[in-house]
Amino acid sequence: MTYKKNPLCPYESGRHRKTCCQKIPRSARLAMRESVEALSKAGKHLEACELLEKLVTLSPHNPLIWNDLGIQYEAAGQMDKALDALRRSHQADSTYPPALYNLGKFTLDRFIGFHKAGLATKAEVQEMLIEAINLLNANLDRDPDNADGHYYLALAYGMKEDERMALAHMTVALRLRQASDTPLEAVVRSVVR
């Protein structure tokens, strides 16, 4: 039997358990994660956020928990809190692909909302767009087969009026969707909307 001196966190944060989840007993972590999933499926996102807030206070360096918290806040319609949680995930591990993807996608969504409503200056809006592009590119550096990452990056480049890059990423997104047996019509319909 091999003894692992520094076992990794069971939640795939990429960090060692001592710096991530040592304070929380494994059974308690699993029970809380299952509760979060059940609450999320039931549409009780704020209750899921409460549980994740408890988890994150016990394990503040775990990018997975921060990422999940951001997703739950977004589902509850609290975008500012969602972005804050995703930024904390990114601070905990700047190479964690799901946090990069979600932070890029949510920043792009925020750009679209601010751009349509005229709530920010042109320079501020462009800065959001560049930030979204950089985050989505960083995600694809670590997860090049992320079809959704290519799709949202294509949208971002389209809004930046860089047709060449938009077309390149949309082509990759369509090819990856086709390879994963996602019906091409569904992808085309989501682009046309």
Image: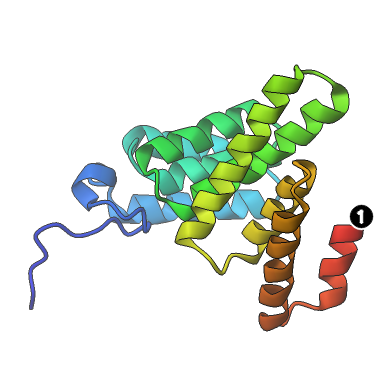
Residue 116 position by quadrant: top right
In the image, taking residue 191 as reference, residue 67 lies left or right, namely left
Q: x%, y% of residue 49?
A: 56, 37
Q: Quadrant of the N terminus?
A: bottom left
Q: Nearer the viewer, residue 62 or 163?
A: 163
Q: Which residue is mark 1?
A: 193
Q: Amino acid at mark 1?
A: Arg
In the image, taking residue 57 as reference, residue 190 lies left or right, namely right
Q: Residues within 10 Å of mark 1 (few under 14, many from 20)?
A: few
Q: Nearer the viewer, residue 72 or 167?
A: 167
Above or below, 73 against 36 in this view is above
Q: Nearer the viewer, residue 42 or 138?
A: 138
- Is residue 55 visible in the rendered image? The answer is yes
Identity of the residue drawn at 66% across and 74% down: 176
Figure coloring: rainbow
Residue 24 position by quadrant: top left
